Every structure is written in C-alpha cells, then in structure tokens.
Amino acid sequence: MAEVDQNGVADGPVRPDRAEAQMSQGSPATRVFFQTVRDHMRKTLSGLSPDDPLRDLVGVMSTQKLSAVVLADSKGAPRGIVTEQDVVRRIAFRADAAQRASDIMSYPLRTAAESDPLYVALARMRRFGHRHLPVVDRDGKLSGVLDLHRVMATAASDLVARVDSFAYERTREGLRDTKAAQTDLAAELLEEGVKAPEIQTLLTHMNNGLYQDLLALNAAEMENEGLGAAPLPFCMVIMGSGGRGENYLSPDQDYGFIIADAAPDDVESADPWFVELATRLSRDVDAAGLPFCSGDVMATNPLWRQTLSGWKAQVDKWNAATTNQAFLDFDIFFDFQPVSGEVSLGLELRDYVTRLMDHNEPFLRRLFAADRDHGTALRSFGRWATNSDAGPNRGKMDLKLHGTFPLVQGIRLLSLREGVTATSTLARMDSLKSIDMLNAADHEDLTAACVYLSNLIFSRQVAEARAGGSPSYHVHPKSLSRRVRRQLRDALKTVEDLLTRIKFEFGGELY
C-alpha cells in the first residue's frame, strides 16, 4: 500500500492490478516504465556531512569503492555531492586533508523520490548530465543514490533513447509535455509488435501518474495558500477504462473521491475543501490532455465525491435501480481502481461491491437488459453497422461501441456473477478460465479478439494523431483491406458468440 503524506496524497504509485503487474514483468519493451527509483537505487550511504574533513570522505570512498558520496545535514536531508572526478580534479596535490568536504561539494542538488518513475529519473539524469542522483524518502531524508551506469546496464539502448522525451519536471507544463509524448511512444511500440493491451496498460499507468502528480501539486498549493491540508483522509479512484487499465490515446476524465467517514458536521465542513481540490484537479488534467468528462463523472460532481458509507449506500441504490442512467453510472463506477491517498478506503469499497454482486442474479439481469442493444458492427448478409448521421463519421463503424464495448460488458457480467475481483478485461478472462467459466478454446478466441480489436483501434488512433487530427474510434469499412475486413469479421464473430451466451445466461425473465 502506498504511504500517505499530510495532504492525504499517496507518496508513491499504487500497486497495479494483476494484469498490469504481469504485463509490466513480461515485456522488455515496457518494463522500464513500470519500475520506480526505489527498485534501482544504491542504498549504501556514507553517513558523512558537509562539515566532515576530506580525509574521512576519501577514506569512505576508498573502502566502500564508491564513485560518489552524498553529504547530508543533521536531519538527514542531502546538501551536496562529491564525485570521484571531484577528488581527482580538486583534491589531488592541492587540498588539505583537514579541509571540510563542503569546500569541494557540488550544490544545490537535484534529487529523486523513491517513488518516482525510473524512466523520469533516467531521462532527467541524461538531460542534465548527472552520473549520480541522490534519492530521498517521503520525509525528504537521504535514502540512497541512483547511479546512471547501473541503470543504463539494465536498459537497452533503444529504451534509453525512448525515455529521453519524458525528462519532465513535476510541473503543469512538464506533465502536459509527457502526455503529449505518449503518441510517439505508442507508435514506436506498435511498430515493434507490442500488443495493444500492453500499450493500453502502460498509457493508463502513465495517465494515473499524471492524476497523482497533479493531485499532490494542487493539494500542496492549497495548503500553502492557507486553505489547509486535507480535512479528512480520502482516496482518489479512477473509473471506466482507466480503472480497467485500458486507456487509448484520448480518454476523458472519469475519477472520484472516497472520503473517510466522520461526524456529519465534520463531513459538511470538509466538503468545500474537496470541491476546491476537484475543481483545480479537473482543470489541470484537462489542460494536460485528458478532457473534462461530458457525462460529469468527476469529483466536482457530488455523486462521485462521497464518504465511504455514502458510497456503500449509493451502491445499494444502484443495486435496487431500474433506470438506464443508474446502470450507466454503475457501469462506469464498477471498474474503479484506487490510485492515490488512503487506498484502504478503495479496497474496502471494492470488497463491499464484490460481495454484493456475487451471484446477484436479479441485478445482473437488469444490467444485461440495459446493455443488450449494444451489439457488434456485424449485420446480416455481410453488411456493417455504420453511422448514418450527418457529419465526419457518417458511413463509419464505431469499433469501440460495436467492438470492444460489448466484449468488455459481457466479460464483466460473467465476472460480477462469479465474484472475480480483477478489473482488466484480459485479467478477468484469465480468472474466468481458472474457475472453469471459460474453456480453453473460448479463452483463446476471446483473448485473440480483444487483442485484435485493440490493435486495430490503436493503429488508427496513432495515424490520426500523427496526421494532426483527434484520435477516434471510427473507421470506414472501405478504408480496410480485404484481409483486415476478414480478420475483423472473425474477431466480431467471437464477440457475437459471447453475446449469445450472455443472452442465454442473463436474458431470462426479470424478477
């Protein structure tokens, strides 16, 4: 679990779900983007301060075979660094052994936090020519050193070149730059044959980090402006495709706050602080490249900003609901993942929802009825379901609405019924196979269909973005080759088979 600072903001990235963890371990092409500075820092510390004599400094470097020593003050905060090059250039033949280390140390220092993404720290080191970067813990105390040569030894040269575009600082401008760099990163990974679901997991991981950084930035600014720290512990959750780890290039904002339970008066008095934080956060996330949610699924909306007990009551309301809007809200909510703050609040809510939905046939039947019209883009006699409305998408298929969406929905229904806790579609398929709810052949076909549809959408989005357009989910059938159309039919036929099963198992009489 991530530690939480005084603003209620997580010190480091929340552990990804099982699917994200497996993907980050499985591919050398993306692994570096999931690792943190903590994973690669050297923990050997000298214990020296700027006031210690040079003889002690040289002795430590010699006995411990260190190429650099970071000097810390009495509170443990790093104040300067002395490298082996400093020893050669500044000490040899000229310095007094009793001279203080502060006379030759380099300062002020750039530092990295233990929880910083490794690729960001690596990019900064290369950008500023640093061979060593001091690492601090959540209290600002020196905890280790990141050595460039050690990190470079673990990353292939093409990966090192790839991360250079992510040498951002934790500022609004820096975060906008790293979001903009995602298109080129996705394009390069696609060209190398990395499968789209893995790229989606990576982009989601980076986008969630963007939320996390902007949340921390705004919380700190509010405290500095005299608005105080978070009045109650809280957890930020990401919902929709972000919760599943399935972001494409242009996701909008789907996030909420779970606030710790407290006395009603305390909750009421605390709410303006959370409204202000959500307002600032949504503004900055939009400016960074994740637009406002057209459906208002943001913590600025009271529906998505509730106490833990309020969220549980909301889930109970959805469980008893009969309106399509309620089912749409639940659809967006259910795939939530905690990404920052008091993560235990999110985990407790996840456990509550999972237990409530476990074999909850009445609710699942109503949920199916609300979604049953979302079929695939296949129509009878070889026709495609295309948009007939006037506009730029006329005559095009929506490969999300009539491709991945019914697949995601069908797998989610099976997972809800069986108490599966995973949120990504591929991880849910794996869980369903492990409990014999999917046989080996169906699991293989559905996995292949999911990968193919995601690849097709991603390749189109990258092409549109590189051409200066806005990434979309629409494609004209005539723009596809005969081979691609045949493969698309096969993938959609697999989804159709899943929907046939879902209709049989969930489409009986409502009761």
Image: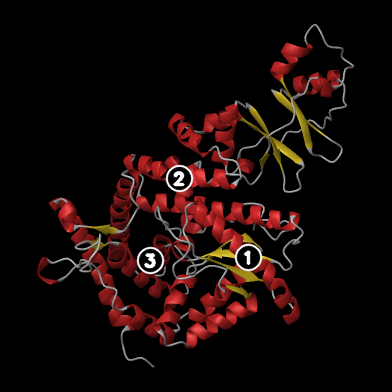
Residue identifier under label 2 = 180
Q: Residues within 10 Å of mark 1 (few under 14, many from 20)?
A: many
In primary-sequence order, the first of circles 3 and 1 is 1
Compared across the picture, whether 20 is left or right of 450 comes to right
In primary-sequence order, the first of circles 3 and 2 is 2
- How was the colour assigned to the protein in this rendering? secondary structure
What amino acid type should be assigned to the residue bearing mark 1? Cys
Front-lying residue, 175 or 206: 175
- Residue at point 64% right, 75% down? 307
Specify the quadrant of the image occupied by residue 302: bottom right
Front-lying residue, 167 or 283: 283
Q: Position of residue 365 (x, y in %)?
A: 37, 84
What amino acid type should be assigned to the residue bearing mark 3? Lys
Query: What label does residue 235 carry, if any?
Result: 1
Q: Residues within 10 Å of mark 3 (few under 14, many from 20)?
A: some
Q: Check the image and report above or below for 355 versus 177.
A: below
Residue identifier under label 3 = 433
Compared across the picture, whether 334 is left or right of 109 comes to left
